[in-house]
Image (cartoon, grey):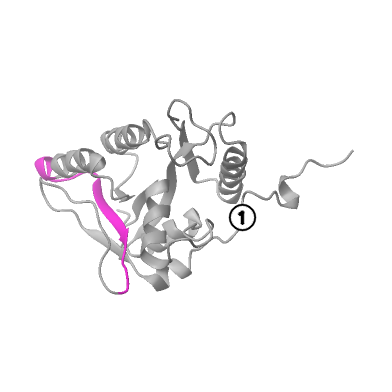
Amino acid sequence: MSDEVRVTVFLDWQNVYNHARESFHARGDHYTKGQVNPVDLSEVLTSRVPGGSLTAIRIYRGMPDNAYDPNGYGAARRQESNWLRSDTRVIVTSRKLRYPDGYTHGSSNIGTVKEKGIDVAMALDIVTMATDQSYDLAIVMSCDHDLAPAVERVLTRRSTRGEGPGVEVAAWQKESRKSPRMRVTRGRVACHWLSQQDYWGVTDDRDYRRPSPIDLPRRR
């Protein structure tokens, strides 16, 4: 019998990015600060699992609307293309961001832009893939407590059956104190704390608002 543990890493992208900025950067730092390479991050998390073998990297993100934010849309598309080119294990699920009525790009007094449906899509995949036994262990990196019921469902399923897929969570750890992490009310879930040193090892400093040569169309 193989001792290999098939690991799927689930990344709530905006949550990962925002908490990295809060944990390791000053307010007002360049918007690239907080970006990480999802493959490197997932490899670090998998390395902490005895016998772990990274089989899938699932990224969930809000997608800017080209009509409201063409620069943000272009940057997000370039970033997503870079992820998909870098590793065949990467799967990206995106949902269009929701903009308030009267929104103008750059405005600060007309409400906030919100993600809609990302947590639902992520929760469904966590539970469905556990039911299908598509992974042996899920590592969920998000502090969104709306995902807690999905994590609890996998924990309950495993404890009730005495076998089957497991689930753990991950979070950034500030130098002075631990950052927020996902908590559950049913059962206990292990957390992989990632230090500032871990963060510096997986950062991505590319400015996706500026096309690189690989993004530009070739001349004929």
Q: Mark 1 sits on what residue?
A: 207
Q: Would you say 114 lies left or right of 215 here?
A: left
Q: What's the residue at 33%, 36% (across, down)?
A: 119
On the image, the x and y values in percent for residue 95 come to 45, 31
The residue at the far front in this view is: 109
Residue 45, compared with residue 121, is above or below; it is below
**Region of the chain picked out in magenta, as a range:** 159-175
Q: Nearer the viewer, residue 189 or 102?
A: 102
Q: What's the residue at 40%, 37% (across, down)?
A: 112
Q: Residues within 10 Å of mark 1 (few under 14, many from 20)?
A: some
Q: Nearer the viewer, residue 173 or 44?
A: 173
For residue 157, which quarter of the picture? top left
Amino acid, disc 1: Asp
The residue at the far top in this view is: 101
On the image, the x and y values in percent for residue 59 come to 44, 44
On the image, the x and y values in percent for residue 23 come to 36, 64
Q: Is residue 12 visible?
A: no
Q: Is residue 48 visible?
A: yes
Q: What's the residue at 27%, 35% (across, down)?
A: 127
Magenta-span inclusion, residue 192: no
The residue at the far right in this view is: 220
For residue 50, which quarter of the picture? bottom left
Q: What's the residue at 41%, 69% (across, down)?
A: 198
Q: Nearer the viewer, residue 135 or 119?
A: 119
Magenta-span inclusion, residue 171: yes
Q: Quadrant of the C terminus?
A: top right
Dot 1 falls on a residue whose secondary structure is loop
For residue 97, which quarter of the picture? top left
On the image, the x and y values in percent for residue 165 come to 25, 45
